[in-house]
């Protein structure tokens, strides 16, 4: 997904911007570029204010090479971009920054301009010449068209013409030393330094330089020079906003000795789940200070809808069982991209739980807005403080997973499920509907971090299984009930990072079609961690084995029946199945990781995938 950075100060801008762009690489991108303004104060041989653009296809490393690590672009002010193609192929022409025809403005943009075709026709009729196929280029020509000596006015007039989502970074050669930022439905954060200021679409690009930030909100504009930051609204009125301090450790955003971010993040799960759970358990009770205002609405709730995308959706599938069992409220889990267009039966009696690691997924935001418009109360489970989902929802519960860099989520997913378990206990208890042993359930939740660590330690054989299975044509994951929910995420992890065809099936459905695909040596990964349905899954294992399948079963060490039929085994410690998904997924994450490693894949940045999907 696209990334934006901007810098103005007394140091050479290009190397700083290149470094910040590298921090955004994890978001996924296909091209990159810089626009640097010569301030005439350092060894540039162009007039003050001249904007020079350099763009490449592919990695930031290519941009570093092309610009000699930024040395070929002298100047103290600039903007940079990583692009993930939407409108127009990933070419150098389509890469940002885009220049105005008179060379006075350069623009970088995240998001999508929905009315760009109409604007493009209008601008062409007015004599503007287009160099790219992007929706972004209309922005820079509009700015040129509206510019009558005030960049601020030109930006406001331009923004009034745009529909869609945009975070913009803009420089103007008439104003050396200034960078402008505009936000509408796409994240943008200002970084405050000493004698220098920054902006970026993601805090990870800023933390090397400053921890003092201002989050721009929709409809806000910012004008940054090395000594000041001015923020204004669509009417040009100056706004005063609070500075926030980023507490993330720089080290936490780096690999910390592991070969890949994904492995580091898998290993961080005991800590991440503990950080998420611990502050919410007080004197043996689950307490959510952030949800006290939800309590009065709970008796009127007739239905819970969970909506999300990708792994967050699968976290919802896994959490549904605990919510239904403990709250006695029917729960539906719906993909946000489907829900938003489904004219859903949602009203004031519905509680909508929205799950998103990034808090910026376009479909998730749209689904949430749709539900709010129909009167539902929205409760968001989010990992990024101040993100759009967190801002829009009525109630927000943060997962404390820390920054997640690998595109394929791991600790994001497990902390989301941990929160769902606790919300189930919290709502169920508030409504007086829990019929099991509440105290024991809280103890089970408190033990989850330890159990995750055990699941990591119990499976030293995973690299060997990866060697055995990595050349398979396909991998089938089967399970029932809570095991099926985990199988869905297990298969997704496998296909995302190893590019093997992996599918999850509810084990009982095998005989309705999928069994036709079972042949000699077909690997089947069978999840058998739910005792209530184990015998049934066992029959399915026998069915596939009798057709030649090789079964890798995931179960407890004491499960003699499974041990005797499976070819290979993955283990988890024994945990109440209602709360075991966060443990079960861990060996499957490790299996996917090692298979991907065997296949020589780019594990942290899988092809075609983006960490944060901020367009539809
Ligand atoms: C992308 C990521 C997935 C993630 C999904 C939803 O597809 O690659 O890992 O599960 O988006 O993202 P969210 O930030 O809303 O959880």
Image (cartoon, rainbow, N blue to C red):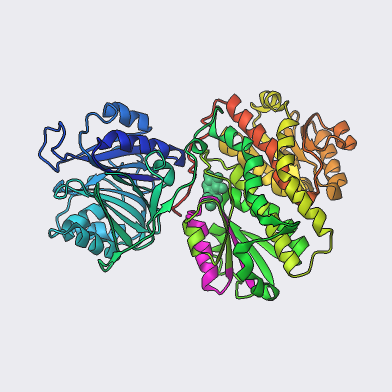
Residue 411, horizontal then vertical, whole percent: 61, 43
Residue 312, horizontal then vertical, whole percent: 60, 51
Residue 460, horizontal then vertical, whole percent: 72, 26
Q: In which quadrant of the rendered view does residue 142 lie?
A: bottom left
Question: Left of 450 or right of it: where is 116?
Answer: left
Query: Is residue 512 at all visible to an observer of this figure?
Result: no
Closer-to-camera residue (511/374)? 374
Q: Is residue 346 above or below residue 321?
A: below
Residue at horizontal 11 percent and vertical 32 percent from the top: 45
Closer-to-camera residue (149/530)? 149
Quarter the N terminus occupies? top left
Magenta stretch encompasses residue 616:
no
Question: Where does the magenta region start and end?
Answer: 350-377
Magenta stretch encompasses residue 362:
yes
Question: Left of 247 or right of it: where is 316?
Answer: right
Question: Left of 601 or right of it: where is 523?
Answer: right
Q: In which quadrant of the rendered view does residue 205 lie?
A: top left
Q: Is residue 87 above or below residue 464?
A: below
Residue 327, horizontal then vertical, whole percent: 74, 65
Query: Is residue 209 at all visible to an observer of this figure?
Result: yes
Q: Furthest-left residue in view?
A: 47
Closer-to-camera residue (235/489)? 235
């Amino acid at each position: 997904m696209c990334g934006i950075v901007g810098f103005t100060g007394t140091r050479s801008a290009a190397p700083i911007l290149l470094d910040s762009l590298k921090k955004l690489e994890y978001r996924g991108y296909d091209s990159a570029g810089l626009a640097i303004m010569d301030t005439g104060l350092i060894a540039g041989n162009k007039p003050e204010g001249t904007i020079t653009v350099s763009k490449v296809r592919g990695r930031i490393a290519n941009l570093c090479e092309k610009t000699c690590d930024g040395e070929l672009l002298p100047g103290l002010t600039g903007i940079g971009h990583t692009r993930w193609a939407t409108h127009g192929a990933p070419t150098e022409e389509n890469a940002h920054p885009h220049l105005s025809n008179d060379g006075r403005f350069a623009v970088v943009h995240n998001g999508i301009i929905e009315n760009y075709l109409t604007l493009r026709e209008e601008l062409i009729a007015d004599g503007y010449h287009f160099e790219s196929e992007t929706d972004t280029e209309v922005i820079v020509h509009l700015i040129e068209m509206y510019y009558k000596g005030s960049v601020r006015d030109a930006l406001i007039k331009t923004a009034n013409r745009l529909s869609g989502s945009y975070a913009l970074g803009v420089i103007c050669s008439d104003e050396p030393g200034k960078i402008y930022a505009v936000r509408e439905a796409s994240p943008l954060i200002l970084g405050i330094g000493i004698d220098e200021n920054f902006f970026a679409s993601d805090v990870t690009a800023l933390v090397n330089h400053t921890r003092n930030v201002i989050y721009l909100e929709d409809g806000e504009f910012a004008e940054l020079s090395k000594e000041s930051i001015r923020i204004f609204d669509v009417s040009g009125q100056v706004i005063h906003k609070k500075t926030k301090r980023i507490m993330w450790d720089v080290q936490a955003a780096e690999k910390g000795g592991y070969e890949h971010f994904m492995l580091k993040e898998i290993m961080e799960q005991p800590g991440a789940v503990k950080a998420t759970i611990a502050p919410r358990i007080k004197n043996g009770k689950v307490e959510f200070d952030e949800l006290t205002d939800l309590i009065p609405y709970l008796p009127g709730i007739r239905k819970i809808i969970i909506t999300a995308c990708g792994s967050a959706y699968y976290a919802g599938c896994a959490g549904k069982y605990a919510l239904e069992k403990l709250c006695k409220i029917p729960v539906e889990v719906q993909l946000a991209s489907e829900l938003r267009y489904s004219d859903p039966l949602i009203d004031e009696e519905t509680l909508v739980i929205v799950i998103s690691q990034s808090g910026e997924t376009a479909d998730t935001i749209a689904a949430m807005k749709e539900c709010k418009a129909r009167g539902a109360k929205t409760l968001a489970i989010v990992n990024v403080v101040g993100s759009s989902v967190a801002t829009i929802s009525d109630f927000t519960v943060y997962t404390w997973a820390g920054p997640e860099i690998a595109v394929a989520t791991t600790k994001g997913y497990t902390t989301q499920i941990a929160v769902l378990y606790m919300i189930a206990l919290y709502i169920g208890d508030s409504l007086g509907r829990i019929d099991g042993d509440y105290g024991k359930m809280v103890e089970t939740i408190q033990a989850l971090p330890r159990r995750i660590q055990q699941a990591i330690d119990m499976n030293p054989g995973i690299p060997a299984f990866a060697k055995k299975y990595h050349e398979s044509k396909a991998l089938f994951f089967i399970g029932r009930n809570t095991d099926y929910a985990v199988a869905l995420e297990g298969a997704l992890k496998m296909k995302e990072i190893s590019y093997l065809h992996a599918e999850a099936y509810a084990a009982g459905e095998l005989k309705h079609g999928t069994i036709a695909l079972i042949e000699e040596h077909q690997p089947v990964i069978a999840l058998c961690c739910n005792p209530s349905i184990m015998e049934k899954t066992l029959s399915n294992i026998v069915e596939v084995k009798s057709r030649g399948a090789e079964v890798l079963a995931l179960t407890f060490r004491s499960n003699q029946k499974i041990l005797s039929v499976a070819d290979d085994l993955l283990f988890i410690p024994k945990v109440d199945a209602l709360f075991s998904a966060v443990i079960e997924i861990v060996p499957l994450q490790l299996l996917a990781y090692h298979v991907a490693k065997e296949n020589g894949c780019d594990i942290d940045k899988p092809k075609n995938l983006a960490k944060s999907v901020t367009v539809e």
